[in-house]
Image: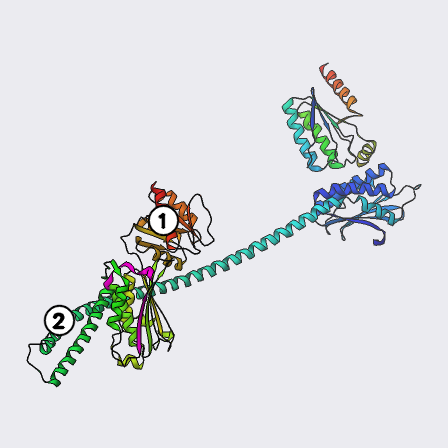
Amino acid sequence: MDRVPILKLGDILIVTIQIDLEDQSVLALQEDLADTVVATGARGLIIDITAVEIVDSFIGRMLSTIASVARMLDAQTVVVGMRPAVAITLVELGLSLGGVRTALNLEKGVALLDHVWDRARR
Amino acid sequence: MTDRELVRVALADHQDVFAIRRFGRGIAELAGLREQDQIRVATALSEVGREAFAAGAGATVVFSLEERDLVIAVNHLAGADLAASEGVTLAGRLVDEITVDIGAGRIRMSKRLPFNSVPPSLDELRAEIARLTPSNMLDEVRQHNRELAATLEQVLQLNTELQETNRGVMAMYNQLSAELEETNRGVVALYAELDEKSTRLREASETRKRFWTTVSHELRTPLNSVIGLVRLLVGPGGEPLAEEQAHQVRLIGSSAETLLALVDELLDMAKAESGRLEPHPSVIDVVALAERLRMALEPSGEASDVTLSVRVADSVREMFVDEVMLTRVLRNLLSNALKFTEHGTVTLVADLDAVTNEVIFTVSDTGIGIPAEYHERVFEEFFQVPGPIQVSAKGTGLGLPYARRVAEALGGALELASEHGAGTTLTLRVPRQMEPPEIQRVLIADDDADFRALAGRMLVGYAAHVDEASDGAEALALMSANLPDVVLVDLLMPRLDGSALLQHMAEDERLRRIPVITVTSGPPQGSESRHALSKQGLRRDHLLAAVHAALGRSRG
């Protein structure tokens, strides 16, 4: 089973998924992310799914779960780089990725997090 | 539907769900679906695949192209009701049509190809699919797995067989060792029996010797009285006897003397047997001795048809030996020869064997000879070759055995060669010099018994004792028991060979100093490190020189 690397940039953890996500990998990623958030005290989590072509209901739910767990640990999650085909499929499936913020790309994801934090400080 | 079928893939484990959805996407692309639809198909396949896999093992996915539809049939375990499952519901949102056949255990999904596209031919599609077949790797891995499992099974089977064989071998081993033990017990019993027999034999031999000694001694006294009395009767000064009486008394006397001679022989034999024949050597005149023998034994009377001749070579006119014993042996041999020769000659020849430095006395006759089958037996005590002459001639059958014993006591040997009816030749070898031995003990270690005997004979008179060993281990034991002055070692021996023997000697504090002469079967070779001797054409003076050199070197 392939493990997905987790990068840390300041307060943000960045995960770039380069492989076709399989269930085991997603489950492992969820645990790794929770551990890393706690260990680093990161406040933001960006999951880049640019390379992911197929997001079925299981993966969609797992992304929601990851976001919920991160929120419990005081970290905001942004999913970036979703392909149009994936987005359409998710909508057709009736999955809204509830509770998961999305951004077009990494840059916008970082900006979104800054914005969220700014608003929280005010 | 089969003729429209593109490919069929097994859904054996969880990983296959992901492989198949990727594969499905590839097929969708080849079939001409747009990218969005490819993703839809793949996602739907993923959803349905999970459900089918969860329903039970042995699911298959069949892709086919019908009219303008890409049809994907997922065959799962029959009886599982997946119609209401979430996966099927979700997949239904992504494909154009989905039907669930609970009875057959099949979910059938179809996706319409775009109107403006031209669907590829089935053959083309199949060829393309074959190229991208995803399950290739998986199949390979599975194949490997199967092969490994098969191999494992084989190994297990082999193992079982081996265990069985092992059990068989153990059983055989047990049986064999039981048999061996039994045999061993038998051998031990046999050995004990043999031991007992040998003890009894020794006792018998002892008794026999005691009997001889006693009897011959006790017999001699009255015989001597008889002989003395006869001499008194017929001697001057006695009462004159009538002619007839005198003749009878003389007959009594000669019979008594013959009897005494026999008894003497018997006593000598007993002495020789008990090893009490100690030679007392002195320098003797061999010519005179031979002449005396000739005079004493030459057949008297004109009737005799036998001539006795003696010849002594110049090189052996003198020798250092026990004269009494040598005379006895020669007299014995000559009288025997004369006894069994009716016509012809008896010859005594004394000559020197330069190689071994022995004097060789040859007694040959032209008599009746001895058949080959008796050549060994004539050296047995009380044995006489059956025949008419033997019946008429007086004898105890002790002559030759006695002669051989005396010859051995002199350090020599007695050999016989004869042909029935064509005479007999007896060869007596006596060492020429019997000076006080120069060295005490020589050990000859060689597996060649002939060489040991030859070298041993050459050393007679030079060394007081000669030990013989047939291999290295025996040699080591002998030299540890009695430290020799010189060791003759053959390098090629069974068990412990010569080199190993020398190695052992070098490691031992006591044996290290013993000079060693190595003996080889090959031609002589110069050896710097050690005194070496070749067996080929070995002469006594060479051997003694080598011994001298070895001793001198070690002492110097």
Which range of residues does the magenta coloring cover? B302-324
Residue B474 position within the rendered picture, expressed as x and y whole percent measured from the top left:
36, 53
Query: Callout 2: residue from which chain?
Result: B
Q: Provide the secondary structure element on which disc 2 rests.
A: helix
Mark 1 or mark 2: which is in front? 1
Q: Which three-letter amino acid code belongs to the residue tagged 1?
A: Val
Q: Which three-letter amino acid code belongs to the residue tagged 2?
A: Thr
Q: Few, some or many C-alpha atoms within 10 Å of disc 2 (few <14, some 14-19, many ≥20)?
A: few
Query: Callout 1: residue from which chain?
Result: B
Quadrant in which the C terminus of chain B appears: top left
The residue that disc 2 covers is: B221
State the image quarter where residue B40 is shown: top right
Confirm whether the magenta stretch covers residue B303.
yes
Residue B159 position within the rendered picture, expressed as x and y whole percent measured from the top left:
56, 54
| Alpha-carbon span between mark 1 and mark 2 | 51 Å
For residue B7, side relative to residue B291 (left or right): right
Residues B435 and B508: in front is B435
Residue B58 position within the rendered picture, expressed as x and y whole percent measured from the top left:
71, 50
Q: Which mark is residue B547?
A: 1
Residues B168 and B185: in front is B185
Up/down of A99 relative to B111, above or below: above
Up/down of B451 relative to B31, above or below: below
Please name the residue shown 56% across and 57% down the image: B161
State the image quarter where residue B275 is shown: bottom left
Residues B121 and B504: in front is B504
Residue B184 position within the rendered picture, expressed as x and y whole percent measured from the top left:
38, 62
Q: Which mark is residue A92?
A: none
How many circles with numbers are drawn on the protein?
2
Q: Is residue B160 visible?
A: yes
Confirm whether the magenta stretch covers residue A122.
no
Q: Is residue B274 visible?
A: no
For residue B339, side relative to residue A9 (left or right): left
